[in-house]
Amino acid sequence: MVLLGALLVSIAAGLAFGGLLVSALAGFQRGGQFLTTSTERFDYDSYALTTRLQDVQLDTDEGVLPAGIATIQLAATGVPSTEAVFVGVARQADVDAYLSSVQHTELTDVRTDPFRAGYREIPGSSAPRPPTEQTFWTASASGTGTQVISVDVRSGSWAVVVMNADGSQAGVVDLQAGLRSSLFAPVGLTMLLIAGLLVLVGVPLILIGANALGKGIDPSLAADENRRRGLPEDLHRTASDDPARDFLAHPARLTGYLQPRLSRWLWLVKWFLVIPHLVVLWLLWTACFVSTVAAGVMILFTGRYPAGLFAFAVGVFRWTWRVQFYASALGTDLYPPFTLARVPDYPADFEVPYPSRLHRGLVLVKWWLLALPHLLVVAALTGAWSTTVVVIPGSGDVVRTTAPSLLGLLVIVAGVALLFTARYPAPLFGLVIGIHRWTYRVAAYVFLLRDEYPPFRLDQGPEEPEARPRATAGWGTARREPPPPPARPPGL
């Protein structure tokens, strides 16, 4: 149910985006406006500039579609503007007959970023008769200044021809194309209606299925477990609220134990091996987003996160972390299991204790406003640096460069170390885990799982730090030792 609902919602999101875009285009052209391209300059040394064969098939079993479904507009301006220019549209057969023995240039390719046109020269030995004297044009215009033609799209093979109005050789012209269609409004509305129907079916499937899945997953750490670790049951305080401790352990607990012996080469193909996981996780995260929105509404009115949906969200986080630990952190060669539940013998785990109450008002601001400083830090640690575009002068080529993220760079260094030494440097592993731990704490806060604000702290190592007591007054006083950490998974 969850996967099917997530698939329907994903399709609905795409249709809704497309429907809004098409509807916006329909609104733009209500006043008779055309959707136009930028004006670009074309130059040719022959007698005419033509387009390649354009086949249009609008015939259906019921007959030809009505005219006006799509209208093409072409605007041509001679360079200089005092130069008389001709622009016309005709059937390809008539254009071929007119230019059969005439040297002309065929436009083969147009690129927009940056603009670049490709041409093919077609040889000929004779000069053409002036285009204004021909009668086969479906639409044409000639003269100085900007010449504009509009033609309804119809079935057939068509070509656009640009020439000097007197039929002389060589020319430079600025061209702009435009489109207007009566189909934009009904197509946009249809896409939005279909998207709405898919959402009405997909969202209940997600919520019912996620709640059912979550019922089989332990959503919280028991209160006696919190007390055993020296943590308060509610975990709604910060370090400054407890004068007896330097800091409180964060409730979102991410663990990852480095496998002692790792393959030298397996990390090179792990990205391929986890493709099945990525497909499932894409749907699960879609469902998690929907369930989080529903949980946010419940928190706003009741102050409680539905336990089933909470356990489902934590399960999605846990599954994602296991896949990342395998393929991104490179901490283990054990293939991650396909489950939302905890797997005691797997070296990576994530858990969040179920909160008894959540602040109603925070649900409106914590996921975007309060989390913004952390989101900026996480983006700097895990996101690629901005893409730079360098245009090489004189060639029109574009060189795009993207710097890897800090986390990605650390993992690459770890992979190279594994390849040549078969060892993962322990300090490097600790830093990689610390970045992931910070990211998951912020994600737990953004997805409304807890109200505790994430600390600006890079806690490294395979285990979460425990609540640390302060030293008592006096020089040389030893600190009390924190409770023992949880046992490692068997075999590690």
Image (cartoon, grey):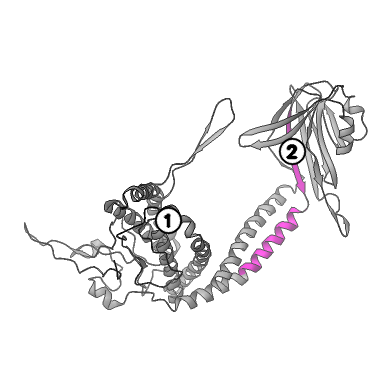
* Number of numbered discs on residues: 2
Q: Position of residue 243 (x, y in %)?
A: 19, 64
Q: Secondary structure at mark 1?
A: helix
Residue type at the position of mark 1: Leu
Q: Secondary structure at mark 2?
A: strand
Q: Position of residue 310 (x, y in %)?
A: 43, 72
Is residue 431 rendered to the left or right of residue 152?
A: left
Quarter of the image with the C terminus in it:
bottom left
Write down the residue under mark 2: 177
| Label drawn at residue 473 | none
Residues 468 and 270: in front is 270
Is residue 133 rendered to the left or right of residue 307?
A: right
Q: Position of residue 33 (x, y in %)?
A: 74, 43
Q: Position of residue 469 (x, y in %)?
A: 17, 64
Q: Residue at left 78%, top 23%?
A: 46
Alpha carbon distance from label 2 to label 1: 44 Å
Residues 228 and 433: in front is 433
Quarter of the image with the N terminus in it:
bottom right
Q: Are marks 2 and 1 in contact (CB under 8 Å)?
A: no
Magenta-drawn segment: 173-199
Q: Residue at left 31%, top 68%?
A: 236
The answer to whether any part of residue 91 appears in the image is no
Place residue 151 in its image quadrant. top right
Is residue 9 rendered to the left or right of residue 433?
A: right
Write down the residue under mark 1: 369
Q: Residue at left 30%, top 71%?
A: 490
Q: Indicate yes or no whether the magenta region holds residue 452.
A: no
Graded by Cα atoms within 10 Å as few (under 14), some (14 to 19) or many (20 or more), the crowding at tag 2 reads some
